[in-house]
Image (tube, rainbow, N blue to C red):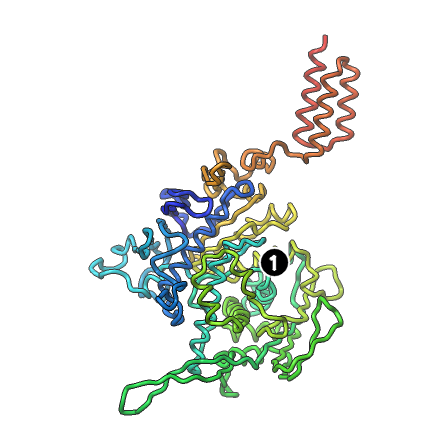
């Protein structure tokens, strides 16, 4: 998708975005660039309101998702018995206008999938949002009355991918709710033993640090291809910046003994079309562990796929392990686990790529689904409150993850190879910056060929200056157009940032500068810079966009101020020349030092 415009119309606004706040993205004279990847940078000082745009979009698409998903649990909607349930007429962003471009999904119909579809969504307070296909007449007869629920779902983003380097509770809230939708969708299929695709129907995907190992492992296994050697190029930043050369080995531990109480339906009589309900306990992983013919190469069971890729596997009661943070302390339980060990070589990667159809996203979505199974302990009453809650700190009130030994899947003994080291290391040995770099680029690689909206809240926080300077380029490389599928994909990315380096690597038409009124707490400006940011020095960007008073540290500036007081007292050329030597010996190179030395020179020249 490609965003065009967002306007907030509700009386109270949303967070720091006031009523009639409007932000324009791709402009009409740039429509030809809709398929190009140009991330939008939302810049400004802390608390300027830039992150609220990401939060607003996440809320909007979650509300739309909830309306147009084919599956919702029977306790989902608001009713007399469930006053906190979901109401399709009410949203946290209750009045807005939103416009964007997208391409038609192949499942939509036999249409040109390289032609831009113009989508307009309008929501008035207390009413259902209205989704319009603005240029529908260019594709099919306008005599068709309205869009079906299924068609509207195809016009929404394929995925909305969220990531925040910090704890942005408001951004994560709709994603947090969406995980429960995916879990409930999966559980609803347990009543019948049917093939289940790990791909979620809900589009919102929030990939915080708990997904880091799944993201990294998937990329290392699926992009390093012997059959398609050009694919490996996408992993070059992993090597060039982090020095990560390969995965050596890892273990998956999957808990198998968790059962769910499932309500099913059965025919009462063959001649009478009536059904009755029944309660039964069903193994939580049953639909991922379907029994396949042993001689079949193409298998449906996802647990079986993992077994066939493993170096060895076994099932064990009383599986004992240790927490890496406790080093030696052992824990024992009476549960049943499947333990899969992988000593990774080319054959291992070929096996994963074969069984997951050479599509990294298919493997990651299996890991994602297994991680979501950790929600099995949350009761229906708790989930009812979650779906209807407007509390931004909800995920602090309810524990998302059970204790380690109660988790459905764990990634253990994940060893990687790093340049310059003879021995392999644990992934946990990487620095915060290395983790963040691999995580942010890794999630982009996984969703690179999807019609997605990426919402990235300060993804470069822990990067060193060199990585910050190269981050936008690295993102562009992730979405390179080497493959035909990439050329037919339209994606959008919004990045909030405090880094002049990212802005210096972006053209001004893709930069928005936010300012907030300190008294009202509302955004008063959302403007493109008044100068070309691409190639501009970070010092100038720091001063003009982030309103930095100077380009050196505060303590150094104080010392320069002391020199300035000394300058005012000196009157002879000799003493002024000594001051120049003193300043140059004590202060490093900077714009401030150059200006101050010039100021001294001017005073020397003025002495007769």
In the image, taking residue 320 as reference, residue 269 lies left or right, namely left
Q: Give the percent coordinates (x, y) of residue 394.
A: 51, 60
Taking depth in this image into account, of 471 and 317 the one nearest to the observer is 317
Q: Residue furthest bottom?
A: 270
Instruction: Determine the residue positioned at 32% across, 57% down.
Output: 128
Q: Secondary structure at mark 1?
A: helix
Locate residue 49, reporting x and y percent.
Answer: 49, 44
Judging depth in this view, the residue of 298 and 192 nearest the camera is 192
Q: Is residue 485 visible?
A: no
Q: Nearer the viewer, residue 237 or 378?
A: 378
The residue sitting at the top extreme is 608
Q: Residue at x 55, y 70 (%)?
A: 371
Q: Quadrant of residue 398?
A: bottom right
Rendered position, 300 above or below 570? below
Question: Which quadrant holds the N terminus?
Answer: bottom left
The residue at which mark 1 appears reads as 438
| Residue displayed at 75% across by 28% down | 584
Judge by depth and name the residue closer to the eye, 182 or 102: 182
- Please, is residue 28 above or below residue 354 in the view? above
In this picture, residue 186 sits left or right of residue 145:
right
Q: Which residue appears at 77% of the width and 22% of the height? A: 579
Number of marks in picture = 1
């Amino acid at each position: 998708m490609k965003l065009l415009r967002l306007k907030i119309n509700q009386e109270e606004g949303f967070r720091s975005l006031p009523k009639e706040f409007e932000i324009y993205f791709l402009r009409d004279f740039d429509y030809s660039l809709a398929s190009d990847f140009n991330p939008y940078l939302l810049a400004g000082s802390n608390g300027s309101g830039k992150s609220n745009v990401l939060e607003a979009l996440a809320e909007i698409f979650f509300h739309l998702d909830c309306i147009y998903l084919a599956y919702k649990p029977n306790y989902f909607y608001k009713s007399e018995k469930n006053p906190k349930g979901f109401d399709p007429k009410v949203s946290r962003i209750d009045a807005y206008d939103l416009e964007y471009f997208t391409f038609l999904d192949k499942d939509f119909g036999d249409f040109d999938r390289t032609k831009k579809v113009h989508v307009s969504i309008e929501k008035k307070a207390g009413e259902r949002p209205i989704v319009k296909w603005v240029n529908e007449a260019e594709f099919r007869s306008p005599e068709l009355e309205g869009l079906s629920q299924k068609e509207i779902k195809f016009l929404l983003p394929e995925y909305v991918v969220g990531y925040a380097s910090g704890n942005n509770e408001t951004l994560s809230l709709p994603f947090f709710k969406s995980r429960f939708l995916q879990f409930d969708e999966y559980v609803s299929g347990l009543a019948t033993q049917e093939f289940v695709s790990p791909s979620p129907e809900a589009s919102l995907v929030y990939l915080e640090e708990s997904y880091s190992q799944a993201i990294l492992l998937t990329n290392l296994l699926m992009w390093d291809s012997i059959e398609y050697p050009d694919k490996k190029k996408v992993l070059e930043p992993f090597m060039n910046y982090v020095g990560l050369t390969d995965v050596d080995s890892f273990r998956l531990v999957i808990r198998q003994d968790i059962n769910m109480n499932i309500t099913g339906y059965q025919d009462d009589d063959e001649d009478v079309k009536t059904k009755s309900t029944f309660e039964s306990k069903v193994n939580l992983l049953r639909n991922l562990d379907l029994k396949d013919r042993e001689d079949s190469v193409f298998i449906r069971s996802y647990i079986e796929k993992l077994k066939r890729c493993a170096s060895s596997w076994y099932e064990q009661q009383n599986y004992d392990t240790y927490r890496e943070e406790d080093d030696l302390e052992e824990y024992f339980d009476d549960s049943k686990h499947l333990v899969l060990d992988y000593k990774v070589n080319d054959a291992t990667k070929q096996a994963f790529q074969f069984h997951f159809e050479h599509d990294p996203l298919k493997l990651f979505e299996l890991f994602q689904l297994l991680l979501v199974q950790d929600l099995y302990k949350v009761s229906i009453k708790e989930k009812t409150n979650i779906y209807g809650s407007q509390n931004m700190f909800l995920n602090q009130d309810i524990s998302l993850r059970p204790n380690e030994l109660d988790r459905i899947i764990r990634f253990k003994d994940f060893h990687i190879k790093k340049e310059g080291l003879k021995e392999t290391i644990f992934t946990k040995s990487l620095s915060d910056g290395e983790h963040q770099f691999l995580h942010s680029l890794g999630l982009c690689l996984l969703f690179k060929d999807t019609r997605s909206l990426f919402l990235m809240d300060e993804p470069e926080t822990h990067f060193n200056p060199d990585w910050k300077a190269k981050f936008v380029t690295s993102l562009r490389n992730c979405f390179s157009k080497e493959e035909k599928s990439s050329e037919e994909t339209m994606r959008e990315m919004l990045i909030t940032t405090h880094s002049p380096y990212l802005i210096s690597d972006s053209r001004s038409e893709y930069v928005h500068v936010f300012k907030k009124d300190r008294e009202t707490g509302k955004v008063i400006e959302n403007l493109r810079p008044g100068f070309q940011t691409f190639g501009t020095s970070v010092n100038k960007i720091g001063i003009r966009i982030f309103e930095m008073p100077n380009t050196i540290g505060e303590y150094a500036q104080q010392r320069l101020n002391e020199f300035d007081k000394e300058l005012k007292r000196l009157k002879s050329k000799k003493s002024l020349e000594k001051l120049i030597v003193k300043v140059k010996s004590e202060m490093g190179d900077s714009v401030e030092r150059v200006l101050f030395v010039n100021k001294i020179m001017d005073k020397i020249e003025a002495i007769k």
